[in-house]
Amino acid sequence: MRVTKRRSPLSDSNVAVQTSVHEDVHRPELLHHFADPQQQRNSASLGMWIFLATEVMFFGGLFCAYLIYRNWYYADFAAASKSINAALGGTNTAVLICSSLTVVLAIWAAETSRRALMLAMLALTMFFGLGFLGIKGVEYHDKFVEHHVPGPSFSFEHEQIPGHPGQYANPQHAEIFFALYFIMTGLHALHMIVGLGIFTWLFVMAWKGRFTPEYHTPLEIGGLYWHFVDIIWIYLFPLLYLIDRHP
Amino acid sequence: MAGNVDALFIFLVIISGLMTLLIFGAVIYFAARYRHQRGVQAEQIEGSTPLEVTWSIIPLAVFMVIFAWGAVVYFKSRTPPRDATEVYVVAKQWMWKMEHAEGQREINELHVPVGRDVKLIMTSQDVIHSFFVPAFRMKQDVLPGRYTVAWFRATQPGTYHLFCSQYCGTQHSGMIGSIIVMEPAQYEAWMSGGSTGPLSATGEKLFAELGCSTCHRTDTQGRGPNLQGVFGKPVLLQDGRTVTADENYIRESILDPGAKIVNGFKPVMPTFQGLVSEEQLNALVAYVKSLSPAAQSATKTANAAPQGSGTQVQ
Amino acid sequence: MATTTIAPAERENYLNKEYGLGSWLLTTDHKRIALLYLISITFFFFIGGFFALLIRLELLTPAGDLVQADTYNKLFTQHGQVMVFFFLIPSIPAVLGNFLVPMMIGAKDLAFPRINLLSWYLYIAGGALMMHAMLTGGVDTGWTFYTPFSTAFSNTKVIEAGLAIFIAGFSSILTGLNFVVTIHRMRAPGMTWSRLPLFIWAHYATSIIQILGTPVIAITLVLVVAERALHLGIFDPKLGGDPLLFQHLFWFYSHPAVYIMILPSMGVVSEIIACFARKRIFGYTFVAISSLSIAVFGFLVWAHHMFVAGISVYAALVFSLLSYSVAVPSAIKVFNWTATLYKGSIHYDAPMLYAFGFLGLFTIGGLTGLFLACLGVDMHVHDTYFVIAHFHYIMVGGALMGYLGGMHFWWPKISGKLYPEGWARLAALIVFIGFNLTFFPQFILGYLGMPRRYYQYPPEFQVLNVLSTAGATVLGIGYLLPMIYFLWSMRYGKPAPDNPWNAAGLEWQTQSPPTTFNFEKEPVVTWEAYNYDEIDAGHKEEVPVVG
């Protein structure tokens, strides 16, 4: 039988603490290779932060390509940007921000043993997520109908450059805008769908009563992921929708 | 020019050789001298900060010398002299098409006179290629959609390999040719043997045929800017920027006129993308250049992409 | 620590604890996963090596007479893709790293064992897709996928290959993520950062690159696949795009990738030299910080692959300058390893021979990097055999030597058996000789002007090519030998003691082979790394016990 030791607050490294055997019985969620729940929780958290760093680099390459072309073809991009629906995009921004709030509330509810609130907030988060995807679907449909989807049926003739009457956008450059638009928002939507999957699973776990004030790590790291997807959108929205917009 | 590269290379070989001998020597010596023996223990030495600093600073200093020397050589090779003879090169899978400013056309061969500066203005019809002449120690990638520039001055008559050195598909290793360097007299003889006239004259004809002269008149009444003397000079654009009218600018103006509107003019020029071949573009560029008196070439013909555009190609 | 006597009956260990395919394919034991990787990367090494063999055979003669041009283009493309993405990048981290990182820090496993298994499955999925692409048409774009050739001109399986590498990239990312979290959070009590073996520092630095760099090539491949499938114009000048943008995005990862390939090997070399010179690595702190510096600076130099690609002169100047900065930490390491030998007590066992080979070959490879970073020289040798020689010296002479040295060093721990020392020393020698014969002539070929990716060449290049092919044959034999005797040792090798080398390091305080959970009791570390003075104290005849 091992002795429980407290970790010294003055220790110079984030090292493991030996736990007593009987704690494992009370903590079925403690994985065997971790020494104690705190180590497990810290590891999960660090792991998710690092994963989010990889996501930043992943989207970063796209943002980089976008910013370069936007710099080169500013006028054409402005014309193309005008044709996507900023009202819908703005609504989606609000929807996502609300969904991040509900995530935070769900975690708070777990921390304070408010089961009903936790479940409600998780469900609301997913509802907002679905709402986001629905609005996105409407936007994509609009683009399809207007022949703004890159490919054989793409067409962007005689579109005015905002602020320059008589000047028309270069369709090739506009097609690049739309290619990047679809890839960036599409990739983002894919991440949303994965997020919805994660939250479905979290909802099931919550329903089964697996989350307590002491243990709700999956909620925390799922929440981190969801906030990240939200932040990506908060960058995407002004970059894509608000080029050279005037009231 | 090649001599400069060789001198630098030899310098690097000497430094590397010394360094290699030093390391190999030290490793072999220590391995032998300190081979394990009974009763003799290794001496634990933590390190030596002065030593670390020394063997960081000294290599760094040597590296800076190498960098600076290399930068100078590179800069020179990237800066064609003002009055270099110009040759337009169009690369395509899998051949090199050369057109002298005087009009001669060659395929996979380039005749040049010894001792003359030759400037290559190059573009590709399809994928990225690279113009590589080992004997001249020069290499420059040739890109679709824009011009890149290289120059050389051959110092010895002879025939030298030309290789494509950027993988470009099936016959990449077959895309080879020769640079034939001749004595001036021989070169003159070769030149007079049939051509279609100077490239700029071809360009002038095209200029009229395509209707360019309708708007680009030689007075101030035209709907387009007067092109006399414009080459190599700064141009003020509508959006306030100033760019230099180099080969890439002329090319872009033909293929994507909306990219840069000259200050004071309306954006009414139609695009000629799809209506002119690479060779025709070269001719038009040569013609516009010929309208400028002394400066036949901008010394800093951009190897970088022209500001704010990805130029289009037919 | 004294060597234990060999136990007569076979003790329970991670190999014999459970049998059956399921226990291997569903394992979460980092050591079993390491062996799964070992088998997979060895398979791909043979595939890549086979392509290399055909390439060198074709290059025996100036004419293109062994294979057709298109076939040759597929050979060098696939040789590069398989070797880089499916052999070199995983090799040391996925095999030795997976096996040793938890043990070296006193942990029972990595932080995320199931993600570790997922990493392997992603690697297999990517590898399977790559095999399929190669078998149903191949890829001929060069491993560098330059546009617009790859997006608009090639008629081969670019999309499949791109997706295969995309998937394998996530394997790499997850491995890096696992290592960083493990090293931060799961060190045993007393294992402070300054007591970590340099192997751990090296893998930490490698993991940073894997985490931050790999996603960029992932998105670049997504763009290439999208462009090719949907005829977009992001990289195609005919449609308003810029081919140089591809090159920047590609090299932003692919340059740091070469440090993913070499840093782990440097970590192995540190461990081997310390053990076989019986002393602490000279300048431990400087070596650790150099690893991190290489990781950081490695992200700042990518456009030195593009000096003649059409970038501006000023950009070229900046990148050349920065490239020299990344050479300094590498030089520091070589000096520190050499200085470690001073007043050491040096043994010539096979792992040490590989470490010596590494020192020599990495020095040459690194020095030739100075040539390439130099603008004035690169103009001439870019895209020639000089570059090929340079990177093979680093990746084969450096990384692969480190890998083989590490495999020999830790083989007793991994398998519980001793490999035959005599054959191993012979193999090390054959590899060293064969390698130099293969690749040194290529420096000369490059300076004389032979371009890369050529299957036919002017006759004056033939002699050097023949020398190179002859060397390749010798090198091939050198690689086959360890394959054979490692397999042989699994059945017929002498059982290994727990610490045959009397080496420092927590991994040597486990059984050979280790039990599933590595340590009976969680270790508490009270000593510094490489405490060979303590280990050898009182051992007047500290010759390690070896077969």
Image: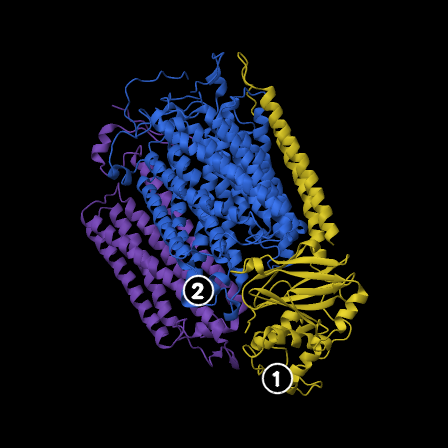
Q: Dot 2 surroundings within 10 Å: few (below 14), some, or many (20 or more)?
A: many
Q: Which amino acid, mark 2?
A: Glu
Q: Which amino acid, mark 1?
A: Leu
Q: Secondary structure at mark 2?
A: helix
Q: Seen from this angle, which residue lies furthest right?
A: B185
Which labelled disc corresponds to residue C227?
2
Q: Closest to the observer: C66 or C374?
A: C66
Please tell me whether residue A29 is drawn above or below residue C137 in the rendered image.
above
Q: Quadrant of residue A91?
A: bottom left
Query: What residue is rendered at 55% in x and 77% in y?
Result: B273
The residue labelled by disc 1 is B210
Q: Name the colour assigned to chain C in the rendering.
A: blue
Q: Name the colour assigned to chain B in the rendering.
A: yellow
Q: Dot 1 surroundings within 10 Å: few (below 14), some, or many (20 or more)?
A: few
Q: Closest to the observer: B50 or C373?
A: C373
Q: Secondary structure at mark 1?
A: loop
Q: Is residue A202 left or right of residue B177?
A: left
Q: Is residue B98 visible?
A: yes
